[in-house]
Amino acid sequence: MANSNKLRTLLKAPVELGWKSTWQYALYQSGLRSGYFRLRTPAPALEKIQSQLPSSPRAIFALPDKQTLQNILGETIPALLQEADAVTEGKFRLFEGPLTNFTLAHQTPLLHWSQFERGKASVDGDIKFIWEPARAGWAFLLARAFYISGDDDRYAQSFIQLFDQYQQENPPYRGPNWVSAQEASLRIMAFCFAYQVFSTSEKFPDTTRCELKLAIALNAHRISPTLCYARSQRNNHLISEAVGLYTAGKFLEGYPPAHGWERSGKEIFQRAILDQIDEDGTYIQHSTNYHRLMLDEALWMVSIANSSGDSFSQAVLQKLALATQHLYKMTDANSGHVPNLGNQDGSNVLPLATADHLDYRATIQAASRQFLGKNAFENGSWDEKSVWLNISSQAESHHDLEDPLLLHSPHGWASLRAVTYHARPAHADQLHVEIWHKGQNLALDAGTFLYNAPPPWQNALRTTQVHNTICIDRRDQMLAAGKFLWLDWADAEIQRSTPASVTARLNGYAKTTVTHTRTLSSTQNGWKVMDELQNQKSQAVEHEYVLHWLLPDLIFDIKGDQIQFHNPAFHLSFATNGPEQPLLQIIRGGQVLHGKSDIKPFLFGWFSPTYAVKQEALSIVYIVHSALPLTTISTSWEFLE
């Protein structure tokens, strides 16, 4: 059975992923196994590279006026300095999570990076815990604090110490931090930003400037050999690597390979944007976090281009405008948060704002100004990113919230997920519903938690059963064929949409004969979700329908057929036309609080706001067994305030 499933995957994957992506991935694997990539990335001739680097790199953007920056940051300046002070004491927010001790040292053999990809060497645990500190997000933080405060000694010295440690621990192309060319690209962004900001100080050592230039060149040299992998992924990897090449090419103007990097980076970036952003503005990875990553990198690219007199095609800028509009519509105006859709690995590659990781206003404000010519929000500390990137405030504000899958009411807003896939899905989350009330996300998406962990936590929160939808016969909506791969893609289509309701249908659930139609409606007191499950066979076939809702860890009581929640005060109630008595189960953090069933609870009742962070939440599980041709299940959200 295992061999037949593997053969099925091998046959179906190229068809669904596309032969071009499959061919590029085959080239990558061939380069690894033949030793070609090892030949392309040998130990470099450091002295020769140093001798060819420009003595004075190009300024990739104009530094902002300090007083303007201080005025915008206002009362958030102490918070910025406090975060930077923590870095000087060896603490940093990995994946934008809680402050933790961090190091750039790693206890792994310093073999050539290709050995790790071939499985000849490995790291203990999740490699992302090694990659995240090496992305050098701390460089942005220390540079911002230095620029705002003028504190040469503490912030500049801390940067120098951390940078020196990174250099010592990661000799060129050896060790796990060289495995991914995307990681090299993100370091280029951080190191270029740090070089430009810290170089405003006469006390910044010439030796560090030289080492920074060398590090940027070495990271750029790592990108080109394995672009076939980035092309095969057809996602943020390719955009990041294009940004890395373009940035290094502009910064190191005069270095012999720089012009080629700049040219190829621009070409790859433009093609990737045109390919990866759909006509409605959705991003190919179906992830709000990766959508922001893409916009941040686009903002960085356009800022660099503008400062050097370069530009991008109108078709590219139009796609970026559509992507900005799409993410803006999904943003809660009170909190700046967005639905936690798709893969959420904590990426924040352009951390130029003093706000929590889930606040998207800095990116959306800058992108709205740059690509739409409008302010998304009123002025605030989230304008810092715009100021760093030399993006001016606009006279016109942006208020268009129309979207066929979004509903707004006096009780807040709600969304229904229904997409047609043009590239591989991230989560099996069709017909997932989000509900927001006064800035609080009440119907949650569980997020990701970890990609690489012992069972059951190896990217387990991508499954249908933990999303706010219905799981039929405990099967996912699609076939799980790998940690990041779904086959038999399940498409949903909008049936009708009005300002008060939206209906969408999911056909062929996991290749069964069941269709799932869901209607989300606003009511006088809240929201109603109606699920209709139709068996296409003429005879009665029994199925198990598991309706799941994930809520924050709120105080609740059960009274009759209602679950009553406090702060905020609302009722949750269910009804069905099924012939059997439904089962109601409430689970917090993998522990059953109410009801009994044979469902394994360990994945239920968890919320992951960012990578490697897992918080207790409430899973409300409503189980219906029905042999009827048509089963209807309704959920009512009724607010009392």
Image (spheres, rainbow, N blue to C red):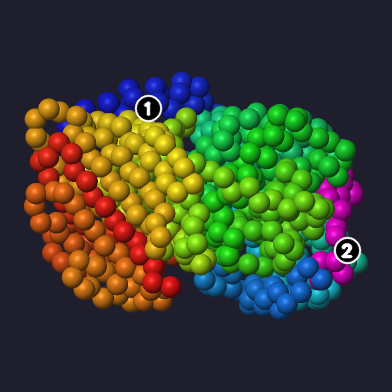
Q: Which amino acid does label 2 sit on?
A: Asp
Q: Is residue 586 left or right of residue 610?
A: left
Image coordinates for residue 141, horizontal then vertical, percent:
69, 66
Q: Which residue is drawn at 61% across and 74% down?
A: 90
Q: In which quarter of the image is residue 206?
A: bottom right
From the viewer's side, name the closer residue of 430 and 629.
Answer: 629
- Left or right: where does residue 9 sit relative to residue 173? left
What residue sits right under mark 2 in the picture? Answer: 65
Between 570 and 582, the one nearer to me in the picture: 570
Image coordinates of residue 268 in percent, x first then y, are 67, 31
Range of magenta residues:
48-70
The secondary structure type at the circle numbered 1 is: helix
**Image x and y of residue 51, in percent:** 84, 44
Tell me the element at label 2: loop
The reply to whether the magenta stretch includes residue 49 is yes
Residue occupying the point 16% across, 46% down:
544
Residue at image x 76%, y 59%? 194
Res 100 seen here: yes
Q: Where is residue 391 in the image (x, y as percent from the top left)?
A: 80, 52
Residue in view at x 70 percent, y 74 percent: 76
Residue 228 picture quarter? top right
